Amino acid sequence: MTVNDWPTQLRERGLRVTRQRLAVLEAVAANPHQPAEAVHAAVAEQLRDITIQSVYTVLHDLTSHDLLRRFDPPGRAACYETRTADNHHHAVCTVCGKIEDVDCVHGEAPCLEAPAELGMSIDVADVVFRGVCADCQQAQAQEHPRRAAA
Ligand SMILES: [Zn+2]
Ligand SMILES: [Zn+2]
Ligand SMILES: [Zn+2]
């Protein structure tokens, strides 16, 4: 596990080092792909008075300075992670909602070609993999042994 020097990273981006920002970065680094509510719950263990609104503000500031990346799982609240340096994708389990990182084969955005006749300058092609994770497949096989064997 890499240790992040958050105070330096904040200063490098011209952001003040605050306890709120450090606590949010640490919470998101420890548990990637968490929605704001979960980040708030984790941060509130250290900073008992922090409001959900402050957490939203911090998440927004850190995301706009590329210290956090925001991911919007289809039909669910936005999630945050500290892995910002690459153009990775996400795989979402449609049963339990688990989110996994998927390395991009191309490595940089956009990794899908848009047709030239579209006439748009494309920055990003969002790719979200959806399916059933290994744990849920196993649980389903145990619940429905015959169906799984068929
Ligand atoms: Zn699952
Ligand atoms: Zn990710
Ligand atoms: Zn890709």
Image (cartoon, grey):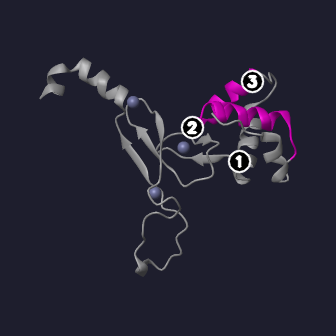
Numbered disc in front, either 1 or 3 = 1
The image's mark for residue 44 is 3
Amino acid type, callout 1: Leu
- Dot 1 or dot 3: first in sequence order is 3
Amino acid type, callout 2: His
Mark 2 and mark 1 residues within 8 Å of each other at the beta carbon: no
Numbered disc in front, either 2 or 3 = 2
As helix, strand or loop, the secondary structure at mark 3 comes to helix
Q: Nearer the viewer, residue 105 or 10?
A: 105
Q: Position of residue 64 (x, y in %)?
A: 71, 53
Distance between mark 2 and mark 1 Cα atoms: 14 Å
Q: Quadrant of residue 28?
A: top right
Which residue appears at 56% of the width and 46% of the height?
A: 71
Amino acid type, callout 3: Ala
Q: Is residue 18 magenta?
A: yes
Residue on which the image places disc 1: 67
- Dot 2 or dot 1: first in sequence order is 2
Question: What are the residue bounds of the magenta stretch?
Answer: 16-45
Residue on which the image places disc 2: 33
Which residue appears at 31% of the width and 21% of the height?
A: 139
Q: Nearer the viewer, residue 86 or 118?
A: 86
Mark 2 and mark 3 residues within 8 Å of each other at the beta carbon: no
Which residue appears at 53% of the width and 75% of the height?
A: 121
Q: Position of residue 77 (x, y in %)?
A: 55, 39
Which residue appears at 71% of the width and 33% of the height?
A: 26
Residue placed furthest toward the front: 2
